[in-house]
Amino acid sequence: MSINIQPRSLIPHRHGSFWAAAAPRPELGGAQAVGVFSEHMKEAEALRQCEILRNLINRGPGNDPDALSEALGILRTLRANAADYPRRRLSEISEELRRWFSVRRWREDSDPAGLRVRDRLMANITMVEKTWSSASEPARS
């Protein structure tokens, strides 16, 4: 069962005004992105979302609130559908993404290009892909 999400043309702002809704991002497959929100995410969907995360990470490092927001949304969806071990890795990715898309925090004294942060992100995503199983799937023996 899929949940059909219809975009609204205006999003209410907490101060009473309205924001125009953003156009669907090409990284999310545009109008096809609603498939991400299936009741039980299958492995193929999870792998596709991991690839989208990689593409977003490649837009950094540095301040990119749009990429961060998009990536955190993907992580929330993955976490909601993941079994225990991938879910823990996804939490680690969430923290690293906040660092990666910050103004300065991605820089470490011994790694001014931020390669270690990027490498940790990519390694964690790879581990999620390798260990993915939906929370609704029976345990693999």
Image (cartoon, grey):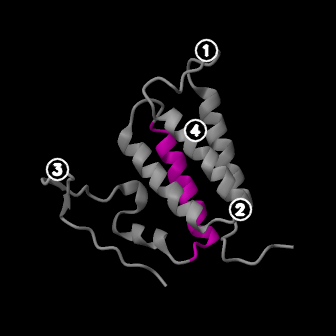
Q: Which residue is mark 4?
A: 96
Q: Which residues are magenta?
A: 40-59
Q: Quadrant of residue 132?
A: bottom right
Find residue 3 and report its horizontal and vertical position in percent.
42, 79
- Disc 2 or 1, which lies upstream in sequence? 2
Q: Nearer the viewer, mark 3 or mark 1?
A: 3
Q: CA distance from mark 3 to mark 1?
A: 41 Å
Amino acid carrying label 4: it is Glu
Q: Which residue is mark 3?
A: 15
Report the predominant secondary structure element of the magenta stretch: helix
Is label 3 in contact with label 2 (beta carbons under 8 Å)? no
- Element marked by disc 2: helix
| Residue drawn at (79%, 74%) of the image | 139
Mark 2 surroundings within 10 Å by alpha-carbon count, few (fewer than 14), some (14 through 19), many (20 or more): some
Disc number placed over residue 126 in the picture, else none: none
Is label 4 in contact with label 3 (beta carbons under 8 Å)? no
State yes or no: residue 58 in magenta: yes
- Disc 4 or 1, which lies upstream in sequence? 4
- Disc 2 or 4, which lies upstream in sequence? 2
Is label 2 in contact with label 4 (beta carbons under 8 Å)? no
Q: Nearer the viewer, mark 3 or mark 2?
A: 3
Disc number placed over residue 109 in the picture, else none: 1
Q: Nearer the viewer, mark 2 or mark 4?
A: 2
Amino acid carrying label 1: it is Asp
State yes or no: residue 65 in magenta: no
Q: CA distance from mark 3 to mark 2?
A: 39 Å
Amino acid carrying label 2: it is Asp
- Element marked by disc 3: loop
- In the rendered image of this protein, does residue 66 appear above or below residue 37? above
Q: Which residue is mark 2?
A: 84
Name of the residue lying farthest toward the top: 109
